[in-house]
Amino acid sequence: MTTAFDPIDLSGVQLANRIAMAPMTRSRAGEGGTATDLTAEYYAQRASAGLIITEGIQPSAVGQGYAWTPGLHSDEQIASWRKVTDAVHAKGGTIYAQIMHAGRISHPVLLPEGETPVAPSPVAPTGQGFTHEGMKDFTTPRALTGDEVRATVADYATAARNAIEAGFDGVELHGANGYLIHQFLAPNTNLRDDEWGGSVENRIRFAVEVVKAVVAEIGAERTGLRISPGNQYNSIEESDPAPTYTALVKEIEPLGISYLHVLENSDIRELTLALRKQFSGTFVINVLSDGPTGHGDLSVIEDGIADIITFGALFLANPDLPARLKTQGPYNTPDPATFFGGDAKGYTDYPALTA
């Protein structure tokens, strides 16, 4: 029986185990959206994960969605990430950069010269966004023109190339949680009547073109995609996600990408299983749990539902999580007060397993 502690080949890279660190926003970037020494310490401490997937990294200045998030679109940013990847590799880890364009989940104070956030259509999300000036109500975004859509696809590819230059082993494209790729997929945020909207075929086009562009730039073996069918986060409405996501996977399957990462939401295990059957590559899952994903959820590997399982909050409090999962604890309790900001030392000094 395969277990989460068995090694796995990920597109030619041997991972030590099937336990991955999920991407989680930390809002601790330095000046100019750069990674810091604390960033390097944070990820290096978690290098025992089979795979680390970073926090969302914006592919362009207009792609920023929260205060103090990092980018991969300047020379300074590329150089800053090199010390992170070097630190992880020195400890034998594998690390993918998650490329995330926030789209409408942003605010003018976060963008150059107070630009209006962009999206498939001018549909405002509900709620507020986190900015360096505090929480602010979301605004109505500006719809991307056709030329701008194609330029944004190119931004993803450039950011992917920059990630490889910075030493990352690959990239994960963030197509989940209500950010830009998801905004194109969802019928309530994509009201376009051109080639990028309307039918399922058109609504998946942006995601497909982004994946194709990144594959062409850095290779399929270095490209992953994260999706969250039916996720209502960030004002997304997908009452019947199956047609959209089965069509999407049908289009990307022949490309041979590194992995498909499914973030489960609501009661979609049936769809998860269908996508698992449809996708022949490495299948990664972030399971739906009542609380933080825990030891009991490792059964998705044993049952063949997924090849790799991702953990979020538990990895923040337990940098040595694979070892703790193997012994079924003890676990440090996640403390949200230590999760964010450049001076949040708590996420690097939790008690060690052997303490």
Image (cartoon, rainbow, N blue to C red):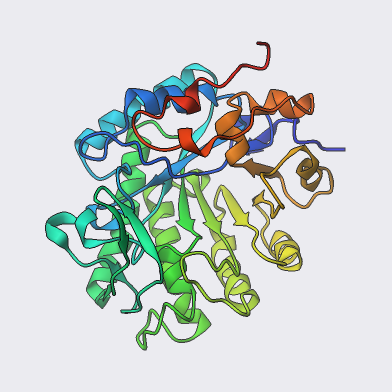
Outermost residue, right side: 1
Q: Pick the quarter of the image with the C terminus.
A: top right
Q: Which residue appears at 34% of the width and 23% of the height?
A: 37
Q: Where is residue 39, by image quadrant?
A: top left
Q: Where is residue 264, by image quadrant?
A: bottom right
User: In the figure, 44 relative to 268: above or below?
Assistant: above
Q: Can residue 11 be spotted in the picture? A: no
Q: Which residue appears at 26% of the width and 47% of the height?
A: 132
Q: Pick the quarter of the image with the N terminus.
A: top right
In the picture, measured across the screen, residue 177 lies left or right of residue 180, that is right
Q: Where is residue 205, by image quadrant?
A: bottom left
In the picture, measured across the screen, residue 123 lies left or right of residue 258, that is left
Residue 72 location in percent, x, y? 30, 43
Camera-side residue of 157 and 5: 5
Q: Which residue appears at 71% of the width and 68% of the height?
A: 271
Residue 175 location in percent, x, y? 48, 60
Count of numbered badges drawn on the protein: 0
Q: Which residue appears at 55% of the width and 69% of the height?
A: 232
User: In the figure, 294 relative to 331: above or below?
Assistant: below
Residue 208 location in percent, x, y? 46, 66
User: In the figure, 314 relative to 236: above or below?
Assistant: above
In the picture, measured across the screen, residue 195 lies left or right of residue 347, that is left
Outermost residue, bottom side: 193
